[in-house]
Each structure stands twice: as C-alpha cells, then as structure tokens.
Image (spheres, rainbow, N blue to C red):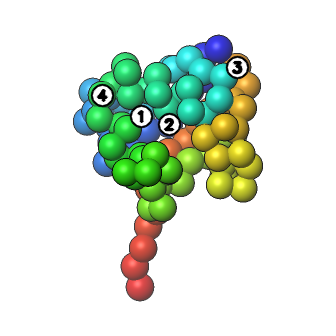
Amino acid sequence: MAVTVRIPTTMRPIVGGVSSVQVDGVTLADVLANLDKAHPGFHERLFDDNGDLRKFVNVFVADDDVRYLDGVDTKVPDGETVSIIPAVAGG
C-alpha cells in the first residue's frame, strides 16, 4: 500500500531535496520504518530513545494529528498522505 510522505524542508537533504516520497505501509509505524529504510536518517530525527515520536515533531495522517488517533499504530489507507511537520516555537 503506497502512501505519500510530505517531507519538511529541514529534512529534505535526506531524500535528495524532494518535498515528498512514496512509501509502503499499513500503519504509520510501517510507513516511518520503510521511510527510514529507503532514506536512512529519519528514525533518529523522528523518535526518541524510548521509541516514542519526539515531542517537537508532529505527524499527520491526512489532516489528523496521530497523537489524537492511535499514534504510530494509526492505520494509513492506500493513497493517503502522511505529513511530517516540525513544531515551531518562539515568541
């Protein structure tokens, strides 16, 4: 099941500068694992030492924040879009 993963500007060097890539996966965990297999370097940027999504990285399946769904166990339908969005802080 192929999904589109939108890559934030700060992480685009890992994927050769493109803004999105196609990855297979049934759950978000599958998608992110396959993203890291195809483009090594994502895992340490997305996950902390406990294996949880980092607090400063927001991940959306379609327009839904996975923190309010099933986290990395969220199902990702074929053809859907996953967006990785770094949190922005400031004053």
The residues tagged by marks 4 and 2 sit, at their Cα atoms, a distance apart of: 16 Å
Badge 2 or badge 1: first in the primary sequence: 2
Q: Please state which amino acid type lies under the numbered disc 2.
A: Arg
For the C terminus, the image quarter is bottom left
Q: Which residue is mark 2?
A: 6
SS category of the residue bearing label 2: strand
Q: Which mark is residue 40?
A: 4
From what the image shows, is residue 26 above or below residue 53? above
Q: Residues within 10 Å of mark 3 (few under 14, many from 20)?
A: few
Q: Which residue is mark 3?
A: 78
Badge 4 or badge 2: first in the primary sequence: 2
Say which of 16 and 31 sits in front: 31
Mark 2 vs 1: CB contact within 8 A: yes
The residues tagged by marks 1 and 3 sit, at their Cα atoms, a distance apart of: 19 Å
User: Which residue shows up at 36% across the image and 37% down it?
Assistant: 42
Location of residue 7 (image quadrant): top left
